[in-house]
Image (spheres, rainbow, N blue to C red):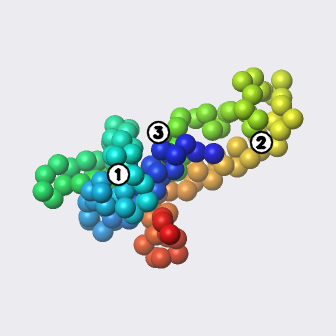
Amino acid sequence: MFSKSCEYGIRALIYITAKSNKGERVNTTSIADQIDSPTAFTAKILQKLVKEGLVQSVKGPHGGFQLPEGDTSETTLADVVEAMDGIAIYADCGLGLKECSDLKPCPLHETFKKVREDLRSMMEVTTLKDLAGQLESGTAFLKL
């Protein structure tokens, strides 16, 4: 459903959010280890997240990645997915057809349309803060 970079981006942001909530910054190696992602790939993902303003990079001996200054408690999964993959997930055909619409539907169109709407609703109300809270409480994890 999501690209691999988007999946890792979501995981990285959940981890960074959990650490930022404790006033900590984390480095690329630590993030890659905690989300079970290759370090070089994680670095590229983090660059994109910084460019999109979802993460802040601080240089120096006490540097690392953290949430941007200000109120980021309302950053949602939808924000992350749109930054990483765009909005195609909400519009693309369930069968991968180039042309699929209400006027010219594929056999899955109506069913898949409902799934996409439900997915969008869930992602628009699910915040990184909520997900990081599950990580911090031990009720969820990012790697086995």
Which residue is under mark 1? 39
- SS of the residue under disc 3: helix
Give the quadrant of residue 18: bottom left
Q: Residue at x 67, y 33 (%)?
A: 91
Farthest-out residue, right = 107
Q: Circle 1 sits in a helix, a strand or a loop, which is it?
A: helix
Give the amino acid at mark 1. Thr
In percent of width and height, residue 75 lies at 45, 51
Instruction: Report the disc number at residue 83.
Output: 3
Identified at 42% across, 54% down, the residue is: 37
- Give the CA distance from mark 2 to mark 3: 23 Å
The residue lying furthest to the left in this view is 61
**Foreground mark, 2 or 1?**
1
Residue name at image x 12 percent, y 56 percent: 61
Task: Determine the CA span between mark 3 and mark 1.
Answer: 20 Å
Q: Say whether residue 11 is left or right of residue 28.
A: right
